[in-house]
Image (cartoon, rainbow, N blue to C red):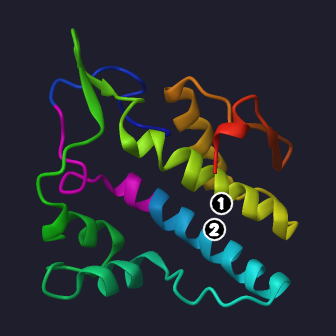
Amino acid sequence: GPASRHQGRPLPERPLMYEACQPLSASYIGIADAEIQCIRSHLEGKYNIDLEYVWPQPENLKRIYGETVISDASSILQALRTNCAYRAILAPLKRVEEGWTFDPQHRFFQEDVPFGLVVLLDFSRLCGISAPKMLLELTLWAQDVMGKEYVVASENSFVNGKDFHESG
């Protein structure tokens, strides 16, 4: 992802998505999760709605998978690495001559970006709060991998990009 130690260079092998999760990636997930919780709080207050089931990531993992599936829930990193349900899931990469590189056609990109990250950014706009920095950074990175332009960054915010209409 953003600030990856690979910086767009192909990997020699296709890593496991969760079991090989790096601390930096888990940190990004934690920051994005805090931003999502902020959006949740603003939406609940502004529109008087109950979003109690938008659980923080550690609680979400525990509630969905339970204690028996995750052997170590001491951190987001460990919960991802030790979740039996995630075992052997490969990173969303495709084979190229030099190794493995991101696959922009993978569902993680095709679904989670336009119908997840972009929607969350739009929720922040509905709430009248500045764009969450990590969610925006992840969206900008992913749309670059995809060759899309859902959003365009502007000072502490974003505007709709030419492909925004393709998002949820």
Please state the horizontal and vertical placement of residue 11, each as a whole percent of the image.
24, 25
135 vs 60, left or right, is right
Disc 2 to disc 1, how far (Cα)? Answer: 9 Å
Q: Is residue 125 above or below residue 57?
A: above
Quadrant location, the N terminus: top left
Does the magenta run of residues contain 61?
no
Badge 1: residue crowd in 10 Å (few <14, some 14–19, many ≥20): many
Q: Earlier in the sequence, mark 2 or mark 1?
A: 2
Name the chief secondary structure element in magenta: loop
Label 2 belongs to which residue?
A: 35
**Residues under numbered marks 2 and 1 in contact, where contact means CB atoms less than 8 Å apart:** yes
In the rendering, at what x and y percent does residue 145 appear?
Answer: 49, 28
| Quarter of the rendering containing residue 27 | bottom left
Closer to the eye: label 2 or 1? 1
150 w.r.t. 47: above or below: above
- When the figure is inspected, residue 34 is found, relative to residue 32, above or below; the finding is below
Numbered range of the magenta stretch: 14-27
Residue at 52% of width from left, 86% of height from top?
53
**Residue topped by disc 1:** 120
Q: Amino acid at mark 2?
A: Glu
